[in-house]
Amino acid sequence: MTRYLLHYAPDNASLVIRLAMGELGLPFETCLVDRSVDEQKSAAYRRLNPNGLIPVLETEDGPIFETAGILLWLVDQHGELGPQIGEPERGRFLSWLFFVSNTLHPALRMLFYAPNYIGEDRAHQAQLTTVASGEAAQYFSMLDREAARSDAVFGAGTVTVLDFYIAACLRWAQLYPVASPHLSRFASQNWPNLHSMAQRLEDRPNVTAWRQAEGVAALPFTAPDYPDPPEGSAL
């Protein structure tokens, strides 16, 4: 039996991997990365991921990092949660997977970690977060329009890894950074197709298992609350 070890932190990008593996019914173990002491920057962790970012999934093929890379590997390895090579939807699936990974997710990171991108000047940080929040809202609108398609590769009848990735991004945008003036603009109800998708996911057994494992309240995507205890940051 394939063995997986997920290096994770609560409410980080590892959440998406946990949900995907839970949906696949894969047995896996977890290893908590202590962000309070920057364990992800340690030499030992950088041997798994030289970027010093979470998550890492250790597999029989070796460690894999980058959220979209892990998700695509799982889809191809197990033949579920996404179109396979040769299927007509594969190209669109890859386009939106990398749109979320390369466009939406980085915009959220700039919103959450403004000092890392623009320094300690508060005025500069405020300007960056205003721009990043506007861009992120625009990207959610694009995803909402795609989810309305009858042949959409997420938000449709068949769950894909994109459903979980987008739902996690919705969650984070509504919670972080704590006390941000931009949180209200990210209410999932602003995007009815994404909201419906998120509601359906909240009823899935693997989402319940994650909530119990990480101390997360009900309605984690449509009316999220902070984990217990609050981690104060996402991604």
Image (cartoon, helix red, strand yellow):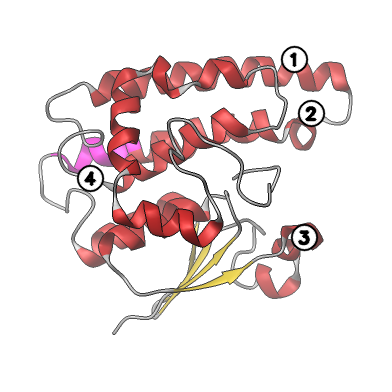
Q: Earlier in the sequence, mark 2 or mark 3?
A: 3
Cα–Cα span, label 1 and label 3: 27 Å
Question: Which amino acid does the dot numbered 2 rest on?
Answer: Ile
**Of discs 2 and 4, which sits in the foreground?**
4
User: Whole-percent x and y of residue 160?
Assistant: 25, 46
In the rendered view of the protein, which quadrant contains the C terminus? top right
Of the image marks 4 and 3, the number of the one nearer the N terminus: 3
Q: Secondary structure at mark 2?
A: helix
Q: From mark 4 to mark 3, how far is it between C-alphas?
A: 34 Å
Left or right placement of residue 125 versus residue 64 in this view: right
Marks 2 and 4: CB-CB under 8 Å? no
Residue at the spot of label 4:
159
The residue that disc 3 covers is 38
Please name which of the two marks, 1 or 4, marks the residue nearer to the observer: 4
Q: What's the distance in space between the residues labelled 2 and 1, CA to CA? A: 10 Å
For the residues labelled 2 and 1, say whether their Cβ atoms are less than 8 Å apart. yes
Residue at mark 1 to residue at mark 4: CA–CA distance: 37 Å
Q: Residues within 10 Å of mark 1 (few under 14, many from 20)?
A: few
Q: Determine which residue is flagged by label 1.
A: 127
Q: Nearer the viewer, residue 67 or 185?
A: 185
Q: Are marks 1 and 3 in contact (CB under 8 Å)?
A: no
Residue 39 - label: none
The part of the chain drawn in magenta is 89-96
The answer for how far apart the CA atoms under marks 2 and 4 are is 37 Å
Q: Which residue is mark 2?
A: 118
Label 1 secondary element:
helix
Lateral position of residue 79 relative to residue 206, left or right: left
- Of residue 195 and residue 137, the one placed in the foreground of this image is 195
What residue is shown at x 55% (from left), y 55% (from top)? 215
Q: Nearer the viewer, mark 2 or mark 1?
A: 1
User: Is residue 90 within the magenta segment?
Assistant: yes
Residue found at x 74% / y 72%: 43
